[in-house]
Image: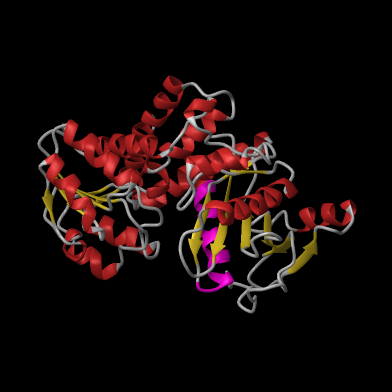
Amino acid sequence: MPDTHQSMEWGPSVSKAQRFSDVSARASTATVLASRSSSTRRRFRSASAEAEFEEVHISQGERSGATMVIVIHRRVEGRSLGGCRMWHYGHPSDALSDAKRLARSMSFKAAAADLALGGAKAVIALPDGERPVGAQRERLLRDFAELIESVQGRYITGQDVGVSVEDISYLARFTEHVAGHPVSEGGSGDPSPYTARGVEAGIRASLTGALSGRHVVVVGLGHVGGELARRLHTAGAKLTLSDTDERTRALASELGASWVAPNEALTVPADVLSPCALGGIFDQEMVASLQVPVIAGAANAQLNEDRVADALAARGIVWAPDFIINAGGLIAVACELDGFERDRALRAVDGIADTLTEVYAHARRDRVSTLTAAKALAGERLSSSALAA
């Protein structure tokens, strides 16, 4: 679908709580201001019911001046859930495109995990410069809380890149539509350990036989990748680690792991390649260079394009679809909405292995890629939730 917002500029021309609806590749962008009557807003939602995205809200913060975006891909039982990403973008259209891409992925992720939630995402586009702290950060979060409130409960936010548990706790002072509260406040806390646990479960489901003694390459040693590496070490796996941040070499020393530069990590011969950094790393050329039978990692949007999944399948490489294997954090946060119980959340996260086993069986039976099989599973569950609504 063509992006209809390429002419959008930074600055006051982006009004508060402005909506855009992408109705089709041929349709023009419909803009509805939040100040219009409720009847107009009802017509807008009805008119966009068949659009790929149910709602897109763009706001310029009154306190911070920052551009903020909330994209709701779809709702289930009136609700959608997706974290907020605080990131530097060169242009507001980049922020919007990122939010759309992530919101779409969240819908598939929630459906594949069989959650009664739709998919959404938020982005706070930072200006150039240092990461905001102190009063500057509070102004950003106050503005974002107001944007969340304007959506009237149809969007629930949580953590993503650049947003901390402390930020979530601060947001909760101004809006109730927040999940991922600190453990001390009865919430699920940092989602990273749950995501790492789910990826480990997915790696086990993707291998034939035990994990102990297997060689796993973990690329990206942030909150999730670092926790995953520790879990794999405890399970007896042989590790090769890599990250663009040289400071993470200390983890390799701690775990007795090998270390390689990022430009070499993707072609190391191993049993499993686990990408846990940024997405879009696998293209047709890279597939030809891979020396692993399994790819199973936490990174979002790992494939440069969907047809890369077919190339992986043609080479006999098992790829764990990212929106299934990295759903552990989402599952834990979703458990919080009904009263968080850690044991219940852990059981649900471990269920990622069963979902992947089902996807792999479908792929083998129908001779399709694991991406095709995963999308079919998510599509079935999306349809079921739509019929139940």
Helix, strand or loop for the magenta stretch, by majority = helix
Q: Nearer the viewer, residue 364 or 161?
A: 161
Above or below for 67 versus 78: below
**How far across and down, in percent of the image, does residue 34 sit?**
80, 58
**How far across and down, in percent of the image, does residue 273 sit?**
22, 51
User: Which colour style is shown?
Assistant: secondary structure
- Is 42 displayed left or right of 99 in the figure? right
The residue that appears at 66% across and 67% down in the rendered structure is 24
Q: Nearer the viewer, residue 134 or 282?
A: 134
Task: Using the rendered image of the protein, determine whether residue 234 is visible from the camera's viewpoint.
Answer: yes
* Magenta-highlighted residues: 90-107
Q: Give residue 214's quadrant in the image.
A: top left
Above or below for 2 versus 348: below
Q: Nearer the viewer, residue 179 or 4?
A: 179
**How far across and down, in percent of the image, does residue 270 sit?**
13, 50
Q: Residue furthest front?
A: 135
